[in-house]
Image (cartoon, helix red, strand yellow):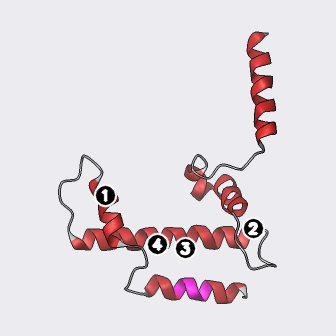
Amino acid sequence: MSETNVESKVERAAHNKSVSLPMSRVRLIMKSSPDVSCINQEAIFLTTKATELFVQHLALSSYNNGSGKDTNTLSYSDLADTAEETETFQFLTDILPKKILARDYLKSLQELEEDDDN
């Protein structure tokens, strides 16, 4: 799939008036906030559509900057790299951290403990 083909699909989805995410789930998430008492349908629709567009933008940016262009894939590491390297997505670095091996994590913990002891 070429890059322009992917971008054209995203563009068509952005102009589509239907949504793919379940609006009932978005309503449930919105109502979980103690500050929200009632939500009208337009607000739920707009929040759902905005969420879809955000996820599409993140996926497209990750795909364009990622390593899976040749194989037409998008991996977690592509998402994590985009979150870390792109200023727009840096607020996601806690949600999409780069994966590290357990032994590397334990080694860094041990080094931190040694530094604290000194």
Do residues under tags 4 and 3 come within 8 Å of each other at their CB atoms? yes
Among numbered discs 2 and 4, the one appearing first in the sequence? 4
> Element under label 3?
helix
Residue at image coords 57%, 87%: 9
Type of amino acid at the residue the image marks with label 3: Gln
Residue at image coords 67%, 52%: 84
Query: Is disc 2 surrounded by few (<14), some (14 to 19) or many (20+) residues within 10 Å?
Result: many
Separation of disc 4 and disc 1 at Cα? 15 Å
Image location (x, y in percent) of residue 98:
70, 50
> Element under label 1?
helix
Rendered-image quadrant of the N terminus = bottom right
Residue closest to the eye, 107 or 35: 107
Separation of disc 1 and disc 2 at Cα? 32 Å
Among numbered discs 3 and 2, the one appearing first in the sequence? 3
Type of amino acid at the residue the image marks with label 2: Gly
Highlighted magenta segment, given as a residue range: 7-11
Residue closest to the eye, 111 or 92: 111
Residue linked to disc 3: 56
Residue at image coords 71%, 63%: 78
Among numbered discs 1 and 2, the one appearing first in the sequence? 1
Residue linked to disc 4: 52
Among numbered discs 1 and 3, the one appearing first in the sequence? 1
Residue 30's disc number: 1
**Horizontal side of residue 44 vs 73, given as left or right:** left
